[in-house]
Image (cartoon, rainbow, N blue to C red):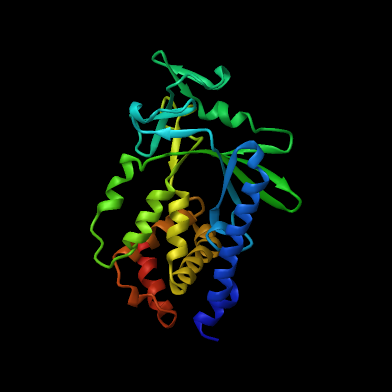
Amino acid sequence: MDLSMRLNFLFGSEVYVRMRRQLVLVREHLITHRHRVYGLGTICSGSLGEGVAYPTSDDDVMAHSKKYRVVKTYRDATQSYDLLLVPSEFSPGYCLLLDVKGSNPYHLIHVIDEMPFLSSSLSKELFVGDRNVIHGPCISAIIGSGEYDLAFCIRCNTWPDVAYKWLTRNRSFNWPSWDIIRNIVQSGCHVVPIGDPHSPNCHHEWRISFSVAERTLMHSFNHAQFLIYNLLRLTLKRIIEREVPDVLCSYFMKTTLFYTAENTPVELWRVDNLETCFKFLSVGVV
């Protein structure tokens, strides 16, 4: 059995992966419909949302309230629950959320320099109960035999400045295409409740999340790229973490693959060329 057949057996054929992703989108729609009375939208993220079905795959759900939104300028703050994105002075990718209209409950507000900010840690504590605990930006709950991560997030109505260069940088091999980039921008990004641990405002900062963009990019991969990503994850779990634990994570594997896909011709990524692709990427990871 050659490598492509083995990986198809482990991670699914191209048709099966496509069906799995469609089921994720259906599940996302059903969850959103079920919670419409609460004004919540949901996004299935994590590795399961990307179409990866592995015993250690993350089952993550992002829930965003439709009455909240994050804006970039005071001029954009036209609704009662709009929050102004104030970039962190300490770390790119993190921000504070200024309560522009003063509409949020007082017990969720933390005052910095006499200005009211929606606190990430106080917001998360609303969802903590007997059966769940805080896990990073998420609330983790064990239901039956599975563990689920729920992240309360807020949608940004415009693309953040910190990621603007990603939109405009030169791409010699036309991946992602302009259609994919346009779709990503229209889908927007979110902020999730966790701060930079080295920041003095870490308990009140929010991290800008591009999980929806990452899922869109993963879904645009051809089957060879999908198989290579899974092989990298398997190598991480079975080999690297046993030798040098807590050094690399699957997110590093994913971003390495994104960068490599931007800088290599699509003709390289073929199911009959998986071994070469894997060796090429392994050098990038190391």
Q: Nearer the viewer, residue 133 or 119?
A: 119
Position in image of residue 172 (x %, y %): 24, 65
Total labels: the figure holds 0
Q: Which of the 4 image quadrants contains residue 105? A: top right
Which of the pair 77/200 is nearer the observer? Answer: 77
Left or right for 241, reference 131: left
Res 248 visible: no
Q: Residue furthest front?
A: 78
Q: Position of residue 108 (x, y in %)?
A: 55, 22
Q: Is residue 83 above or below residue 15?
A: above
Residue found at the very far bottom of the displayed protein: 1
Res 183 visible: yes
- Residue at the image position 63 percent from the left and 56 percent from the top: 27
Name which residue lies at 40% across and 49% down. Answer: 186
Residue shown at 30%/72% (left/top)? 265
On the picture, is 165 further left or further right than 246? Answer: left
